[in-house]
Amino acid sequence: MSDSRLERILYVDDEPDIQEVVGMALELIAGAQIRSCGSGSEALAIAASFRPEIILLDVMMPGMDGPATLSALKRDPTTSSIPIVFVTAKANTRELQHFLDLGAVDVIAKPIDPMKLGSQVERIWMASRGR
């Protein structure tokens, strides 16, 4: 794990098309290794072994939604310190504060701008590390 560069990102979203766009944006533009999955339960299974440095988590997913996934990740000692960013179309001020109160370090609004996503995620990651 590098101290100066974000290298591993886990992206959780039930929409394969959005997974593809985000994956390409983060791999090609930001140079990060990204692993994508389509559900909260998949995220729990992948996160401990992949050891992402940040997790981008869709809020609305069938089955285990984003808030439930965040809660489970925070309860697991192997993933509890990983910063989690919610990705959602619901990003008004009240909901934003609710997501932060749940333990997210930030919120990225959909629709995502692929050209800005890499620098946005890098900035959030650096801020979560106190830099």
Image: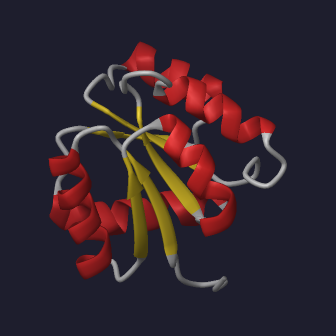
Q: Residue at x 73, y 52 (%)?
A: 79
Please name the colour scheme applied to the rendered image: secondary structure
Image vertical order of residue 73 relative to residue 29, above or below: above
Image vertical order of residue 70 relative to residue 115, above or below: above
Q: Give percent across and percent down for residue 124.
A: 49, 57
Residue 42 seen in the figure: yes
Q: Residue at x 42, y 64 (%)?
A: 35
Give the image quarter of residue 39: top left
Horizontal side of residue 95 vs 1, given as left or right: left
Horizontal side of residue 8 vs 119, given as left or right: right
Q: Residue at x 57, y 56 (%)?
A: 46
Image vertical order of residue 127 relative to residue 67, above or below: below
Q: Quadrant of the N terminus?
A: bottom right
Q: Quadrant of the C terminus?
A: bottom right
Q: Residue at x 61, y 56 (%)?
A: 47
Residue 103 seen in the figure: no
| Number of numbered discs visible in the structure rendering | 0
Horizontal side of residue 104 vs 9, given as left or right: right
Q: Give percent across and percent down for residue 57.
A: 45, 42
Q: Nearer the viewer, residue 67 or 48?
A: 48
Give the image quarter of residue 61: top left
Q: Residue furthest right?
A: 77
Image vertical order of residue 64 relative to residue 4, above or below: above
Q: Give percent across and percent down for residue 101.
A: 63, 23
